[in-house]
Image (cartoon, rainbow, N blue to C red):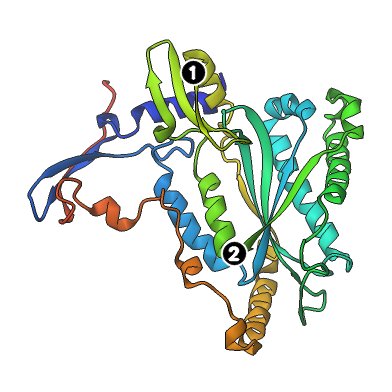
Amino acid sequence: MLPSHLRALHDITACRTGRLGGALYACDQCGAHEYRYHSCRNRHCPKCQEDRAQQWLQRVRKRLLPCNHYLLTFTIPQQLRSLARAHQRCIYAMLLQQAAATVLAFAQHPDWIGGIPAILAVLHTWSRTLDYHPHAHLVVSAGGLSSDRSAWILPAHSRFLMPGYALSAVFRARMRAALLKANLAHHVDPSVWTRSWNVHVQQTGTGEQASLYLSRYVYRVALSNERLASFDHRHVTFRYTHARTGQSRLMALPVHHFITRFLQHVLPRGFAKIRSYGLLSPGHRHDLERARHLLHLHAAAQPASSASTNPSECTARDPHLPTAETMTCCHRCWRGQLVLIERFRRARAPP
């Protein structure tokens, strides 16, 4: 077992227990006491990431440009998944980099955009049933900044950003070249380079809606506590939503198989699963502000009747993510606020 897997198991079992210390709170209305133990802060723990997802959502909304966006999903085929599992740090980084490079190459062509778009890429490794399914979600702005930084260019086609079948061919070629450079291509079945790869392009609306969709994947692990149905010391049963029917179903797995499925989604230590490209990259900070300024000028020039921005879009949030109010509200009377009384240090191992 990898050290990262052992660390994830150790942190998850100790999370919200007396081993990590905690605090005692009292309600200022009903006087009820509530113990709250500290969290492990491991990014693979299903109990520690809800508040971080909401904080990330607020930060990324300030960075995204005020325009429509597209969601592009790049998936590597089945024949490459065993290689990705064996070389996670290399293949995951390669997946994100080559997917973004493919979009940037198409965006530079005037047949599609003719400028530099803003790209936010997120790695996702699991399916609904916890199977190993590495793919990358890219939120791409519907338009880009011109090469001379003087104008914001809209896509050449109003109904779509760029064709998925053309993206898949270029993405496949770029991945092959990257694997050859990394001396990993000899592990791959040659037939994979003649098959069609899957690249899905979908319009998501404003940046508010796109970031809300991504917040459910950024700091959320493969399985949440709400999806766990039962455990009988031999099998773990969890819920999942069927992709075709949309109905909720149950799946029971032996304990060791369940742990194996969960741990294969633990990322290498220090690996950045969220990356920025194009105008969102650190090297284009001034270009990003220039694009934002141009978009604001364009919005101000439009008549008030054409500004169909829904106020609920700007304030929309994921209902599954907690707020500061729910975190400090008394869970007994639901009227008062919790006040800190005492802190407890984390348990120390015997000398």
Residue visible at 61% across and 72% down in the picture:
66
- In this picture, residue 17 sits left or right of residue 184: left
Q: Quadrant of residue 124?
A: top right
Q: Is residue 194 above or below residue 349?
A: below
Residue visible at 81% across and 50% down in the picture:
164
Residue 246 vs residue 196, the one in the foreground:
246
Residue visible at 18% across and 50% down in the picture:
330
Name the residue type under label 2: Gly
Q: Is residue 175 above or below residue 131?
A: below
Q: Position of residue 32 (x, y in %)?
A: 10, 45
Residue that label 2 marks: 207
- In this picture, residue 84 sits left or right of residue 217: right
On the question of residue 180 being in view, the answer is yes
Identify the secondary structure beneath mark 2: helix
Residue 280 vs residue 20, the one in the foreground:
280
Dot 2, crowdedness within 10 Å: few (<14), some or many (≥20)?
many
Q: Position of residue 318 (x, y in %)?
A: 45, 53
Name the residue type under label 1: Ala
Q: How many marks can you see?
A: 2
- In this picture, residue 338 sits left or right of residue 218: left
